[in-house]
């Protein structure tokens, strides 16, 4: 544990409103065990600031005004080093003092300092030594207000040193050395505080607290939990681990809210994005804006919104002493800020009836009299069919490119000059042209496998559970729809409206033209298949009237199925699912089932 010492004064150099420095003060307090605490906060507001510290972890704000009646706000939150010192002193019932000179018109200064997270890796001592070396190269004259403040704090510390044996002083990193040098003075000028006619202690409304906390609610909450546990293994918290945990827990909320999947590569991409974004801004760890930007860019706005919701949540705001609540904006407290828009798919502002109905979700039932009465939601059918057409074109294009070749120019430019081959054979003084291959016919079936449906690990004493127990075959309603077979989540597991159920595909296949497919799940010809995905692929080969079958999955099909396709003159075109848009795949994967055609008239009130 690092601190500076002069006689019976122990000083911890800090930066305000950062979790890492608050943790260093807490550790120093436990090691030094002082009988008095002094902090770099305005002495004129001593009682109000102590009251604010006593309310922690609840949030407070001390409100005053300057000589021109402009409001001044002093935020009190757990992750500030000065308030951590005051709070620690109040908990063990030792005296605590705010000893700073209260001044008006203090300029907004922003020093270029290393990222506070460096303390987690190199320690406060190395951090402070690096900072002191940087001051030698960028020495700036001390302004008059700072000089007066340092003299005043030096005088107050000297007075306290006469009454207490062990004083813990928490002060700004810029001022500690100067204050220690000034303590040895034999006399001090008589400095006067700025006049404060009215000082008030308030708290923040929930919305305001979410916006103006210096450390976001997630970081402050985790710091408070680690502080209460008091374990050396978990204190101080590691910001990097907290950010990772935030993104991981947000993914669970995202999956639950949207029904979309969250592949592992999303988390890897987010962590790489925020690392690079932070380094561009000379930071080691990203701030909340950078985290949300990464979430929005690497996944989608809905995931960014879930991350934001979790990041700003702060459960310790209670206001048990009924202080007045303020609605402050981030600009009022901290100045200019950045905005981020989530662009979520909003509900219609005029659709109040649908919003009221959705509250009674527990009363909805899905009763399907028979398999011939259920039907799909037409707008979703259109999206699936269009994507199927896209995959058919992509499959044909892949084979065309595989069959392409380069030939010397003779009588025709064919599909254009092949610049690379021409340069490579420049010594031959010949032009080489591209000759596209001709794909063997068109695509007869398309298979998309989102999840292989590997059985989940059963709990002790429990049977193995299927993730996608519902499997069925649907026949196209008209000549613009394909026949479809799929396996999905249970049809009654998530009822979102009267006779309207939300499901998620594990995988599906489409075959053209329609009205030819039997129920493949009851067909004994597919009994040798080892998974539902293989049933879909084998059936797609059987029912394809054209020679190509497009297969989209995370891993290619077994060679056995390739041989099976070749036996019947078919060819499987494999497309890794990672090559396709995850946003589009998430949109495709979720679908709705209606227990009758009459529900199509009201389905749009419950499906968004």
Image: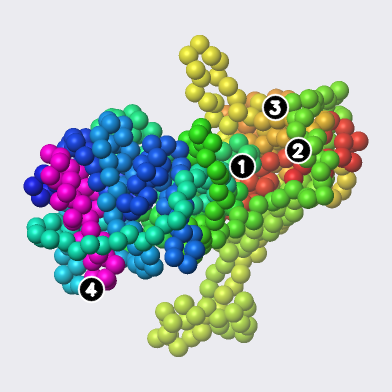
Q: Earlier in the sequence, mark 4 or mark 1?
A: 4
Describe the element under mark 3 as helix, strand or loop: loop
Relative depth, front residue between 128 and 415:
128
Q: Is residue 168 magenta?
A: yes
- How far is the residue under mark 4 from the one under mark 1? 55 Å
Residue 158: % across, % down:
15, 51
Q: Is residue 410 left or right of residue 132?
A: right
- Of the two numbered discs 3 and 4 in the rendering, the one whose residue sits closer to the viewer: 4
Relative depth, front residue between 447 and 375:
375
The quarter holding residue 103 reads bottom left
Q: Earlier in the sequence, mark 2 or mark 1?
A: 1
Residue receiving disc 3: 493
Residue receiving disc 2: 592
Name the residue rendered at 26%, 56% in the picture: 172
Residue receiving disc 1: 260
The image shows residue 414, relative to residue 476, as above or below, that is: below
Q: Earlier in the sequence, mark 2 or mark 4?
A: 4
Residue receiving disc 4: 140
Q: Main secondary structure of the magenta part?
A: helix
Q: Earlier in the sequence, mark 3 or mark 4?
A: 4
Q: Earlier in the sequence, mark 3 or mark 1?
A: 1
- How far is the residue under mark 3 from the one under mark 1? 16 Å
Name the residue rendered at 27%, 71% in the picture: 143
- Could you tell me if the residues under marks 3 and 1 are in contact, i.e. CB atoms within 8 Å? no
Describe the element under mark 4 as helix, strand or loop: loop
- How far is the residue under mark 3 from the one under mark 4? 67 Å
Q: Which residues are magenta?
A: 142-171
- How far is the residue under mark 2 from the one under mark 4? 67 Å
The image shows residue 316, relative to residue 278, as above or below, that is: above
Residue 582 visible, this orientation: no
Q: Residues within 10 Å of mark 1 (few under 14, many from 20)?
A: some
Describe the element under mark 1 as helix, strand or loop: loop
């Amino acid at each position: 544990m690092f601190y500076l010492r002069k006689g019976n004064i122990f000083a911890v150099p800090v930066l305000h409103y950062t979790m890492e420095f608050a943790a260093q003060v807490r550790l120093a307090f436990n090691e030094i065990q002082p009988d008095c605490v002094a902090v770099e906060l305005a002495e004129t507001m001593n009682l109000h600031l102590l009251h604010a510290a006593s309310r922690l972890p609840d949030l407070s704000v001390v409100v005053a005004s300057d000589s021109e009646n402009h409001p001044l706000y002093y935020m009190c939150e757990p992750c500030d080093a000065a308030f951590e010192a005051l709070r620690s002193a109040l908990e063990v019932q030792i005296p605590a003092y705010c000893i700073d000179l209260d001044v008006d018109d203090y300029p907004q200064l922003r020093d270029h300092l290393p990222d506070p997270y460096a303390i987690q890796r190199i320690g406060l001592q190395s951090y402070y030594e690096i900072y002191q070396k940087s001051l030698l190269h960028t020495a700036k004259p001390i302004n008059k207000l700072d000089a007066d403040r340092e003299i005043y704090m030096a005088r107050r510390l000297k007075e306290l040193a006469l009454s207490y044996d062990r004083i813990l002083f928490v002060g700004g990193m810029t001022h500690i050395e100067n204050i220690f040098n000034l303590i040895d003075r034999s006399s001090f000028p008589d400095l006067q505080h700025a006049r404060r006619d009215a000082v008030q202690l308030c708290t923040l409304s929930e919305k305001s607290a979410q916006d103006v906390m210096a450390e976001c609610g997630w970081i402050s909450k985790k710091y408070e939990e680690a502080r209460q546990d008091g374990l050396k293994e978990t204190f101080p918290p590691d910001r990097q681990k907290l950010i990772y945990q935030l993104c991981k827990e947000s993914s669970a909320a995202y999956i639950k809210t949207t029904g979309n999947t969250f592949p592992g590569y999303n988390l890897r991409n987010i962590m790489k994005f925020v690392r690079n974004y932070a380094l561009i801004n000379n930071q080691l760890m990203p701030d909340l804006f950078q985290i949300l930007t990464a979430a929005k860019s690497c996944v989608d706005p809905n995931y960014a919104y879930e991350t934001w919701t979790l990041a700003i949540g702060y459960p310790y705001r209670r206001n048990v002493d009924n202080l007045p609540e303020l609605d402050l904006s981030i600009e009022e407290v901290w100045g200019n800020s950045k905005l981020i828009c989530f662009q979520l798919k909003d509900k219609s502002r005029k659709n109040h009836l649908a919003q009221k109905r959705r509250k009674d979700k527990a009363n909805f039932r899905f009763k399907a009299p028979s398999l011939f009465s259920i039907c799909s939601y037409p707008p979703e059918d259109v999206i699936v069919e269009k994507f199927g057409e896209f995959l058919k074109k992509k499959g044909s294009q892949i084979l065309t490119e595989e069959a392409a070749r380069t030939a010397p120019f003779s009588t025709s430019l064919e599909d254009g000059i092949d610049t690379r081959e021409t340069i490579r054979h420049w010594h031959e003084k010949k032009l080489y042209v591209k000759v596209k291959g001709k794909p063997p016919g068109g695509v007869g079936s398309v298979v998309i496998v989102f999840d292989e449906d590997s059985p989940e690990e059963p709990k002790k004493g429990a049977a193995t559970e299927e993730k996608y127990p519902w499997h069925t075959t649907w026949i196209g309603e008209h000549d613009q729809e394909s026949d479809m077979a799929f396996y999905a989540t249970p049809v009654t597991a998530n009822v979102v409206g009267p006779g309207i159920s939300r499901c998620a595909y594990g995988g599906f296949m489409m075959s053209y033209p329609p009205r030819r497919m039997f129920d493949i799940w009851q067909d004994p010809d597919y009994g040798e298949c080892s998974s539902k995905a293989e049933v879909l692929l084998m059936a797609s080969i059987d029912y394809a009237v054209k020679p190509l079958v497009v297969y989209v999955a995370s891993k290619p099909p077994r060679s056995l199925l390739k041989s099976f396709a070749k036996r019947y003159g078919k060819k499987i075109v494999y497309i890794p699912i990672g090559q396709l848009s995850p946003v589009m795949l998430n949109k495709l994967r979720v679908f709705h089932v209606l227990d009758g055609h009459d529900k199509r008239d009201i389905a749009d009130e419950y499906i968004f």
